[in-house]
Amino acid sequence: MQANEKIVILDFGSQYTQLIARKIRESGVFAEIYPYNIEKSKIDVIRPKGLILSGGPSSVYAEGAPHPVFNVFELGIPVLGICYGLQYIAHKLGGEVDKAAHREFGRAELIIDKHNLLFKDIPDNSIVWMSHGDSLTKIPDGFEITAHTKNAPICAIRSLEKKIWGVQFHPEVHHSEDGTQILKNFVREICGCKENWDTHSFVENAIEEIKEKVGDKEVICALSGGVDSTVLAVLLHKAIGDKLHCIHIDTGLMRLNESEELIRLFKESFNISIELIDGSEYFLNGLKNVTDPEQKRKIIGKSFIHLFEIAAKRFNNAEWLAQGTLYPDVIESVSVKGPSVVIKTHHNVGGLPEKMGLKLIEPFRELFKDEVRAVGRELGVPEWFVNRHPFPGPGLGIRILGEISVEKIQTLQKADAIYTEEIRKAGMYDKIWQAFVALLPVKSVGVMGDERTYENACVLRAVSSVDGMTADWYPMPYDLLAKVSNRIINEVPGINRVVFDITSKPPGTIEWE
């Protein structure tokens, strides 16, 4: 990939910013997200072919509103403003933004007034997604209105002379029917980017970067058993061969028979050896009497690091610790890209001690989940494994609400295995992004065999998603829910009530903790 064949997105805090990058990558162009206050010198080094200003929750004229620290319109490259980004363009260049005028939320019909490259191949009356309280009431000098909606007389503007475009709607979200094409038009037609970002090019570049970074040192790979770390291990092995040392820690919080399946996969499919460490007692002791989910995550994260540090001492030449950290992990953990709100700590990126003794290598840090799956296919990871549902690093530790015990772990493992088995039997596993059981700290009265029971409730969770940033609850067939519920109650001691979660993300998260 050529150094300047990329698009830079400035993040002003929108929950959809990551989707902009993902949609652009789908068009074969690499896009990266940076904070709105990035210095111009760093942009000069990146040399992007186009700049996108994201949406955001702020009012552009409010005190403390996020504004770039330099004049982004003097870079000499095309600029596209989305929602807040459009309002910033108007605010900065002499237009007017009014808080009271034309609030608009949800779907709207886009009426194109002037067809141009941004709207190439976009039909009239295309449905777009609006989410704004402020609106433009006056465009800057030198601009023209190119589209409107029923409630937004100024929905899209452009200035060919200044090479600036702006839209009030969110083309990056799924609800904007032709949004992907609009973003593709910007990066391909307006910015002139070539199609040179795909899985094959990523693998080639990643292998070379890993070789250069690692040199003659060795790498320890934190192999959790999930798709991300597994694909990471295969990529690392392809790059550095026997200089890779895969270590899998059985935390005691894995799914049923998880560790055994992982060892068999690596031995049979990749001829990569794995060192298995039984850390279950260590983790459970650290989690004793702990109920707060954030504290659980931090304890589990620190326990991982501690055991890896011990393991690293057996490899005198080991200098790197590899982790399968993904883009959504980074975004949800800490606002490193822009003014986004911290949702929860991910063990992959939180709690690393300053004097860890190992440096971090994270080749997937800027990838979305579906991109990692594609990398896995490119590397020959079996399809049945590539398509596995995501499993959180803290494992069942954040699917057992409240205090954790061996008994609760065993109960949840059995219930979760039944749920997964029945979903697979019904041919629905690959249609669902993620499905799992969570054990609730709630007991209820039941009756089994004419006897009274007072046992735990569990919740079934199933969502559909593309990248985990947003998700809709999956409409599971009633007959399947009935079968799963019946099996869990009859086969799993300790559970006498099963409920189904119908919360989407947002407002909820996919995991319960």
Image: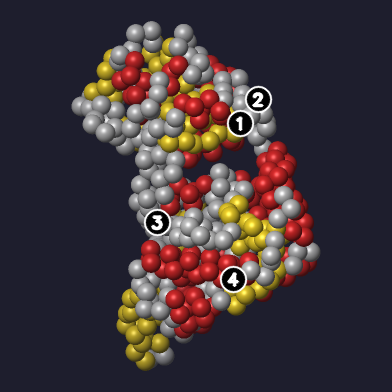
- Tell which circle, 2 or 1, labels the residue nearer the N-terminal end: 1
Packing grade of label 4 (10 A; few <14, some 14-19, many >=20) is few
Mark-to-mark CA distance, 3 and 4 = 27 Å
Please, which residue is most extreme toward the left here?
100
Residue 388, position as x, y percentages in the image: 61, 59
Q: Nearer the viewer, mark 3 or mark 1?
A: 3
Residue 481, position as x, y percentages in the image: 47, 67
State the residue at coordinates (52%, 81%): 281
- Tell which circle, 1 or 4, labels the residue nearer the N-terminal end: 1
Q: Which mark is residue 194?
A: 2
Q: Which mark is residue 344?
A: 3
Packing grade of label 3 (10 A; few <14, some 14-19, many >=20) is some
| Front-most of residues 362 and 504 | 362
| Front-most of residues 370 and 495 | 370
Q: Which mark is residue 29?
A: 1
Residue named by callout 4: 310
